[in-house]
Image (spheres, helix red, strand yellow):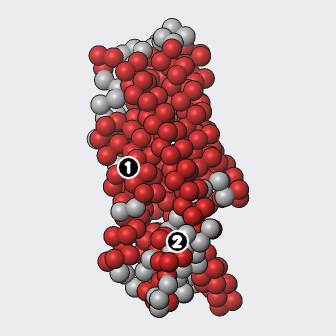
Amino acid sequence: MARLSIYLAGAALSSALGSLLASAILTMDSIGTLKGWRMIFLVEGLVTVGVGIAAYFLVTDSIQSAPWLTKEEKALAEARIKAENVVSTEVVESMRLTTLLGAIFNVPVLFNGLILLFTQVTVQGMAVFLPSIVRTMFPHRSVVVLQLLSAPPVFLAAISTLMLCYLARKTGQRGVFVLVAAFTSATGFAIWVATDHHQAHLRYGAAFLVGFGSFVLGALCLGWTSANCPSDTARAGSISAVGVIGNVGCLISAWTYIPKDAPNYRIGHAINLSTMIGIIASTLLLLTYLRHQNHRKTKGELDGRIQGLQVADQQLLGHRHPGFKYSY
């Protein structure tokens, strides 16, 4: 969860820094023959390519190949992985089709996919349209100033991603923090729906509620999915499936804020308010399901699944194993 939160906080931070960087670049007349948005593409593209080249040499693909870990630290890391995966005895298992399919087609993955879909409608919409929304609040400000005003809510989003994911990991209550984040974001969208563009400062304040609550949802959702996977194969299949379902929201987000709905954008705000309500409802249903399944496993109602099975066959049960308890 910690590494995932840092990774996805970087996505929010890139939007904020992108606004600041774009503001700085647009104050320049040109870079060579390039002007306007072409300068932004050149500078940000060169930085991205440079980081990508460095990552090829710095990022390792396994514990054993990590040069910065000592022999004792590698052994400790592998022991911790084995301790977390109660139904598996292997640190790196071989890929099995049955395990992969079981990880994709199960209730928690489908619910998390739906939650991520709702999240992507909002997050991708905010990433693209927030400067346009801010422009309706301060129509007489320059492009550079509007870019600067768009950055603070997204900076807060990066901070909330790190903070809420840390608290979710420490408390083991990921679903609760999904509800907190969704409710906070829903409050911001409700303010946007209930007000008009003349109430600029109230609307700008609501942007911070939206930023605080919406961007963290992706990290919480994917972290929750990962926590409920009993093996590496299951984790790969589950996170991929959730990502595929969730990215449908990116397609929807492109049509949430349309020019004819300006300056109040009530249709777009109402759509995003609805997605937050959908996340709250989906999370409550998922929590109910997970608690019910854990209760059945604790009472021994599912112990029959492993009777007569060898250890290797028991491992193939994955999340259906009576010894595997879901995380909330």
Q: Nearer the viewer, residue 18 or 244?
A: 244
> Can the viewer see residue 34 in this picture?
no
Question: Where residue 35 sits: x, y (%)?
Answer: 32, 36
Q: What residue is drawn where x is 53% and y is 64%? A: 228
Amino acid at the residue labelled 1: Gly
Q: Nearer the viewer, residue 95 or 213?
A: 95
Question: Where residue 6 sits: x, y (%)?
Answer: 58, 57
Q: Circle 1 sits in a helix, a strand or a loop, which is it?
A: helix
Q: Nearer the viewer, residue 52 or 254?
A: 254
Amino acid at the residue labelled 2: Leu
Residue tagged by mark 1?
246
> Can the viewer see residue 95 in this picture?
yes
Q: What residue is drawn where x is 39% and y is 54%? A: 110
Q: Is residue 42 left or right of residue 297?
A: left
The quarter of the image holding the C terminus is bottom right
Q: What residue is drawn where x is 36% and y is 72%? A: 100
Residue tagged by mark 2?
302
Q: Is residue 45 left or right of residue 19?
A: left
| Residue that lies at the very extreme toward the top in this rendered image | 198
Q: Residues within 10 Å of mark 2 (few under 14, many from 20)?
A: some
**Residue 55 sits above or below residue 25 on the image:** below
Q: Earlier in the sequence, mark 1 or mark 2?
A: 1
Q: Residues within 10 Å of mark 1 (few under 14, many from 20)?
A: many
**Residue 151 sits above or below residue 245 on the image:** above
Q: Nearer the viewer, residue 23 or 7?
A: 7
Question: Where residue 192 sits: x, y (%)?
Answer: 50, 19
Q: Circle 2 sits in a helix, a strand or a loop, which is it?
A: loop
Q: Is residue 315 left or right of residue 38?
A: right
Q: What residue is drawn where x is 56% and y is 50%? A: 287
As measured in the structure, the alpha-carbon distance from the residue carrying label 1 to the one carrying label 2 is 31 Å
